[in-house]
Amino acid sequence: VKVKEIIDPADKVYTIAHRGASGYAPENTLPAFELAIEMKADYIELDIQLTKDHIPVVIHDESVNRTTNGKGYVRNMTLEQIKRFDAGSWFNEAYPMFARDKYAGTSIPTLDQVFDTFGKNIYYILEIKDSTPNNNIESLLNEYITKYDMENVVAIHSFSGTSLRKFHKINQDIPLYQLVWNDYAVVRVSEAYLADLKSYAVGISPNFQGITSAYVAQVKNSGLKVMPYTVNYQVNMNKAYLWGVDGVYTNFPDRFLEVIETN
Ligand code: G3P
Ligand code: CA
């Protein structure tokens, strides 16, 4: 790596608790978000799917199978059905070293519950996950953001550029991040690609394994932010920090805060 490719660490580097403090608590649950706030993360990241009755709920997968004691697709169940599942006991069984009694029985939260519980005590990055065509998830999320007066504390990201462009047409004041997956460590991208992204997004969230210091420098020089995911080891966190990223998504927010403090 040539020295000129390395740029100064950003003034403020965000700690983004990926699915909450999901290394220590069941992902995408109120306890995981609460713990992230206790650990002093800047953002909580949460994945949004829609129920059959079109209610935004916080769950990563399309189905409830992996993270609850239930079975089935979120889109085929009403909120009332979804709320019956236990979204915490699986974690206690899988990670006995981090198990806590209060995790057992916690349910899949609605977006309402999250906003009601944490208000403006934290910044939020909502991920648009539901890929059902024409479900209008973008306008629905915008309604929730405005109803709770959260415009200044919410950002949105998605792997779907179509969804982000749609959201940008609805509300240009919410910062959008394009999630990208690169199979190999990218050194350069085309200026046309960056210019197109800038027409709707403020930044890129790439997988950490797919970036280099040169990539970070190029994207940042174009005026876009870079926030890689999901960085769980301090050796990689330190690298990302020194490359000058604007934030890091991690399941272990305390580890990244330690890296920032020691730099
Ligand atoms: O936050 C980036 C990351 O959330 C994208 O991947 O699968 O964890 O939602 P995933
Ligand atoms: Ca996510």
Image (cartoon, rainbow, N blue to C red):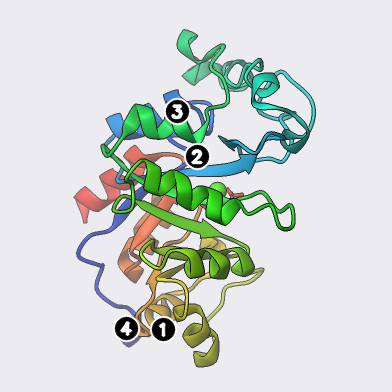
Nearer the observer: mark 3 or 4; the answer is: 3
Query: Which of the two labelled residues, at mark 3 and mark 2, occupies the earlier sequence position?
Result: 2
Is disc 2 surrounded by few (<14), some (14 to 19) or many (20+) residues within 10 Å? many
Give the image location of residue 61, x and y in percent: 68, 40
Could you tell me which residue is drawn at 63 percent across and 69 percent down?
162
In the image, residue 250 sits, relative to residue 138, either above or below, namely above
Could you tell me which residue is drawn at 78 percent across and 33 percent down?
76
Query: Which of the two labelled residues, at mark 4 and mark 1, occupies the earlier sequence position?
Result: 4
Residue 85 found in image quarter: top right
Q: Is mark 2 within 8 Å of ligand 2?
A: yes
Whether residues under marks 4 and 1 lie with C-beta atoms below 8 angstroms apart, the answer is no
Give the image location of residue 23, x and y in percent: 48, 33
Residue indicated by mark 2? 19
Residue indicated by mark 1? 218
Indicate which disc residue 248 carries. none
Residue indicated by mark 3? 113
State how far apart marks 3 and 4 are (Cα).
Answer: 47 Å
Residue indicated by mark 4? 3
